[in-house]
C-alpha cells in the first residue's frame, strides 16, 4: 500500500494531527497514519481489526469510546466509502476529543457544584456589579437572579460595619488577592444575619482584575448554637438561673461598683430545708419541679438589679446590690423565708411544705473578694442551719443581733398598729408677736408594752422601709383631725393642726383622697388642717408632686414645707409649688446666736419666705436668745421646748388655758 502512495503524500498524511484509517468491510486496517497509531496507542495498525462503527450514509461525525492501554478515551469519527482495488473499503477520519470531553466534564461538574452547593456564590465584575449568582444565593438572601444581575454588591450591606471595616477588607484583597471573615449582611426581607464570607480576586494573563468571586455561608444557626453553648456554660440547665461562674462575674462587678460609689453589697446563700424528703417521697422529677418553682418565686420577690443563682442541688444564692444599710439584707431574708415556707403544689396534686435557711455576708464588712464573700455566706448558712433551720444568720454576730432586733421591732409595730398602741402628742405653735398658741404639730408616739413610750426615731425609718408608714400616717391624720374637732366642739378658738406626710404616703397613698375622706368623716374644717411635706417628697417627682399639691390645695388645706434647708432647697421649686408655710429646720436654730453662718442662713430663709408670701415657722426654739433673734427678723411662728415639748392632748389643753387664757 505504502509503495503505491507517493512519498510526498505519505509525509502529508503523517503530518495531519487527526488519525486517518482505511479499513475493509470487516474492519481490517488497510492503512493508518501515525496520528491514528498515537490515538489508538498501537504500533503498526495495518492488518489489525478495529471495532469501530462505520457510517456510510452521511458524513455526520460520531463519538465513540476508546479502550486504550492508558485508559478510557473519546474520539470523533467521520467515514466515507471508497472502492479500493475493486473492493468496498472505508476511509475513516479519527479526532481525539478526550481532552475536550474531560474539560466539558470538569465544567459540568463545576456547574453542578456551583448550582447545588449550599454556600452562596456571587461573581461580580471589576466595577463590583453582580454578574452571576447560584441557587443558594437566592435561598440565603431571598434575592432572585433577575433582582440582582447588574446591581452593585452593596445591595446586601447591613449597615452594621463602618467604613474602616470595609477599607481593611479591600486592602487585604488588593494585597493578597483574598479576604475571609465574618460579616453581617441583610436579606431581601430586611433581616440582618451573620455569614462567613470568602472573597477571591480573579485576574487575566496580564494581571488585570476582571472579577471577584464571593462564597458565603449563613452562620445564623451556628451563632445561635454558640449563644446556647455560652448560655449553658453560665447557667443552670434546670432552672435557667445563672450558675456559680456567672455569679462570680456579677459579684466581682458589684464589688468594683460598690468600692467606687461607697455602697453595700449583700450575698444571701439559701439552702432548702426538707428538700431531700421531697425527693425521697415523690421522686426526683417532683424535686426538679420544686426547684423550678423555687427559682420562679425567688425571681418574683427581688428587684431587677438583684441576681438569683443556683449553685447546685438545693442551694441558691442571691446577690443584692446597692442596698442602703446592712440590715436591709435581713428584710429580704425574712421575706424569702416567709415566701418559701408557703405550700408548694406539685404535679399529680401533691402539696408539700419546705423551709429555707439563709446565710448572709456583706461587702465591705465581711470581705473584699468574691470568693471570700461566698465562703463567709456559706459559713453563716451553716450556723443558721445549726440553730434549727428556717432562719437567717449574718456572718457577723453583731449584725445578726441588730437585724433580729429590727425584725422584732417590725413584728411588734405591726401588732401595735392593729392593737391601738399608737399615740399622738401635740407641740404648741406660737405666734411670735402675740405669744399665743395658734396651732399644734401632731407627732406620733408608740406606747410599746415592752419598752414604754417610744419616739419616732426608733420606728419611723423602719415603717418607711416596710410600707407601714402609710397606715401610721393615715391613723395620725384621722386622730389629729378628730382631736381638733373635739377642741372646736369644746369651745376653744380654731387652731391649725399640722400633720406630717411621709414621702411614701405622699406618692403612693392617694393622699388627697385620704385627706378628703378624713375631713368629711371628722367634720374638721379644711382651713384648720396643715399638711407638712418634706423637701425630698416634693423634689423627687416634681411634676407629679405639683399635681398632688394642686388637688390638696383645692381641698382648702394649708401646705407647709418641713425641715427647709436640709434637702434640695431649690428656690425655683418654692415658687412652683402652691405652698403656704415654710418651716426652718431645728439644725439652723440650735447655734443661734453663736453661729454667724446659721444667723445669716436663717435670716436669708426668712427673707426668701417673705418675698414668696410664705409664712415662716422656726422649729426647735429652746432659748430666749433664739426667740429674740427670730422676733428681730420678723419670723411669724415658732415651736420648741422654750414653750413646751410635745404633750398628750389633755396636757395641751392645760397649756391653751395657761397661755391663751
Image (cartoon, rainbow, N blue to C red):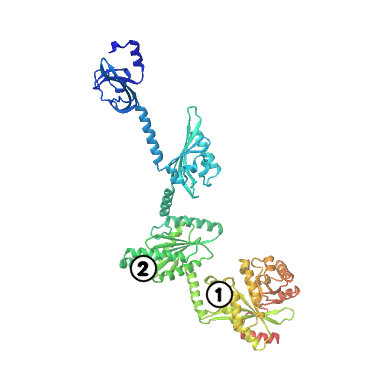
How far is the residue under mark 1 from the one under mark 2? 37 Å
Report whether residue 424 is seen.
no
The front one of 248 and 208 is 208
Q: Tell me if residue 40 comes above or below residue 537 in the rendering.
A: above
In the rendered image, residue 67, in percent from the top left (x then y), is placed at: 27, 27
Helix, strand or loop at label 1? It is helix
- Of the 4 image quadrants, the one containing the C terminus is bottom right
Q: Quadrant of residue 528?
A: bottom right
Residue located 50% across and 58% down the image: 254
Residue 214 in picture, x, y percent from top left: 46, 39
Q: Is residue 211 left or right of residue 496?
A: left
Indicate whether 182 appears above or below 313.
above
- N-terminal of the pair, mark 1 or mark 2, is 2
* Of the pair 525 and 500, the residue shown nearer to us: 525
Total numbered labels placed on residues in the image: 2
**Residue 550 shown left or right of residue 404 in the figure:** right
Where's residue 606, x and y in %? 72, 71
Of residues 645 and 71, which is closer to you in this image? Answer: 71
Q: Is residue 434 left or right of residue 317?
A: right
Give the quadrant of residue 535: bottom right
* Quadrant of the snapshot with the N terminus: top left
Which residue is the site of mark 2?
Answer: 346
- The residue tagged 1 is 470
Q: Position of residue 618 (x, y in %)?
A: 69, 74
Q: Is residue 256 above or below residue 407?
A: above
Q: Residue furthest right?
A: 632
What residue is shown at x 40% (from left), y 68% (from top)? 356
Residue 276's quadrant in the figure? Answer: bottom left
Q: Residues within 10 Å of mark 1 (few under 14, many from 20)?
A: many
Amino acid at each position: 500500500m505504502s509503495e503505491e502512495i507517493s512519498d510526498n503524500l505519505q509525509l502529508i498524511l503523517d503530518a495531519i494531527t487527526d488519525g486517518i484509517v482505511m479499513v475493509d468491510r470487516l474492519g481490517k486496517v488497510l492503512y493508518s497514519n501515525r496520528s491514528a497509531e498515537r490515538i489508538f496507542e498501537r504500533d503498526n495498525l495495518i492488518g489489525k481489526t478495529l471495532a469501530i462503527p462505520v457510517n456510510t450514509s452521511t458524513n455526520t461525525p460520531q463519538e465513540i469510546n476508546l479502550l486504550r492501554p492508558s485508559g478510557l478515551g473519546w474520539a470523533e469519527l467521520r467515514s466515507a466509502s471508497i472502492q479500493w482495488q475493486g473492493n468496498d473499503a472505508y476511509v475513516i477520519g479519527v479526532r481525539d476529543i478526550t481532552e475536550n470531553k474531560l474539560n466539558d466534564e470538569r465544567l459540568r461538574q463545576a456547574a453542578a457544584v456551583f448550582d447545588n452547593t449550599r454556600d452562596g456564590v456571587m461573581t461580580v465584575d471589576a466595577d463590583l456589579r453582580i454578574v452571576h449568582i447560584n441557587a443558594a444565593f437566592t435561598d440565603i438572601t431571598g434575592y432572585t437572579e433577575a433582582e440582582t444581575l447588574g446591581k452593585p454588591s452593596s445591595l446586601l450591606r447591613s449597615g452594621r460595619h463602618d467604613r474602616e471595616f470595609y477599607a481593611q477588607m479591600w486592602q487585604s484583597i488588593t494585597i493578597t488577592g483574598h479576604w475571609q471573615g465574618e460579616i453581617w449582611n441583610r436579606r431581601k426581607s430586611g433581616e440582618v444575619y451573620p455569614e462567613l464570607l470568602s472573597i477571591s480576586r480573579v485576574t487575566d494573563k496580564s494581571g488585570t482584575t476582571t472579577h471577584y468571586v464571593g462564597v458565603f455561608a449563613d452562620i445564623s444557626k451556628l451563632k445561635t448554637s454558640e449563644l446556647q453553648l455560652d448560655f449553658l456554660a453560665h447557667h443552670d440547665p434546670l432552672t435557667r438561673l445563672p450558675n456559680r461562674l456567672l455569679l462570680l462575674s456579677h459579684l466581682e462587678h458589684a464589688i468594683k461598683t460598690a468600692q467606687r460609689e461607697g455602697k453595700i453589697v449583700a450575698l444571701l446563700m439559701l439552702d432548702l430545708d426538707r428538700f431531700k424528703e421531697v425527693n425521697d417521697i415523690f421522686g426526683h422529677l417532683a424535686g426538679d419541679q420544686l426547684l423550678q418553682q423555687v427559682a420562679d418565686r425567688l425571681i418574683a420577690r427581688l428587684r431587677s438589679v438583684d441576681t438569683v443563682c443556683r449553685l447546685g442541688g438545693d442551694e441558691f444564692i442571691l446577690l443584692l446590690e446597692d442596698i442602703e444599710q446592712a440590715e436591709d439584707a435581713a428584710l429580704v431574708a425574712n421575706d424569702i423565708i416567709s415566701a418559701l415556707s408557703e405550700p408548694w403544689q406539685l404535679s399529680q396534686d401533691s402539696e408539700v411544705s419546705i423551709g429555707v435557711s439563709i446565710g448572709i455576708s456583706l461587702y465591705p464588712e465581711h470581705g473584699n473578694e468574691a470568693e471570700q464573700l461566698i465562703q463567709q455566706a456559706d459559713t453563716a448558712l451553716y450556723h443558721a442551719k445549726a440553730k434549727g433551720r428556717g432562719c437567717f444568720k449574718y456572718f457577723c454576730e453583731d449584725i445578726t443581733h441588730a437585724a433580729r432586733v429590727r425584725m422584732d421591732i417590725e413584728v411588734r409595730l405591726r401588732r401595735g398598729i392593729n392593737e391601738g398602741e399608737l399615740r399622738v402628742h401635740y407641740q404648741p405653735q406660737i405666734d411670735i408677736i402675740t405669744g399665743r398658741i395658734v396651732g399644734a404639730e401632731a407627732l406620733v408616739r408608740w406606747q410599746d408594752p415592752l419598752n414604754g413610750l417610744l419616739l419616732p426615731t426608733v420606728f419611723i425609718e423602719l415603717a418607711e422601709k416596710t410600707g407601714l408608714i402609710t397606715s401610721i400616717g393615715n391613723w395620725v391624720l384621722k386622730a389629729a383631725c378628730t382631736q381638733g374637732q373635739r377642741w372646736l366642739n369644746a369651745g376653744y378658738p380654731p387652731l391649725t393642726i399640722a400633720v406630717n406626710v411621709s414621702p411614701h404616703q405622699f406618692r403612693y397613698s392617694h393622699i388627697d383622697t385620704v385627706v378628703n375622706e378624713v375631713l368629711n368623716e371628722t367634720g374638721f374644717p379644711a382651713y384648720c388642717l396643715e399638711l407638712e411635706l418634706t423637701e425630698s417628697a416634693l423634689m423627687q417627682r416634681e411634676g407629679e408632686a405639683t399635681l398632688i399639691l394642686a388637688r390638696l390645695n383645692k381641698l382648702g388645706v394649708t401646705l407647709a414645707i418641713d425641715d427647709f434647708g436640709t434637702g434640695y432647697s431649690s428656690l425655683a421649686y418654692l415658687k412652683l409649688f402652691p405652698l403656704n408655710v415654710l418651716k426652718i429646720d431645728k439644725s439652723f436654730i440650735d447655734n443661734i446666736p453663736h453661729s454667724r453662718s446659721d444667723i445669716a442662713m436663717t435670716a436669708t430663709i426668712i427673707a426668701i419666705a417673705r418675698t414668696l408670701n410664705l409664712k415662716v415657722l422656726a422649729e426647735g426654739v429652746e432659748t430666749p436668745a433664739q426667740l429674740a433673734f427670730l422676733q428681730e427678723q420678723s419670723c411669724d411662728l415658732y415651736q420648741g421646748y422654750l414653750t413646751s415639748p410635745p404633750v398628750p392632748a389633755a396636757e395641751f389643753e392645760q397649756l391653751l388655758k395657761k397661755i391663751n387664757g
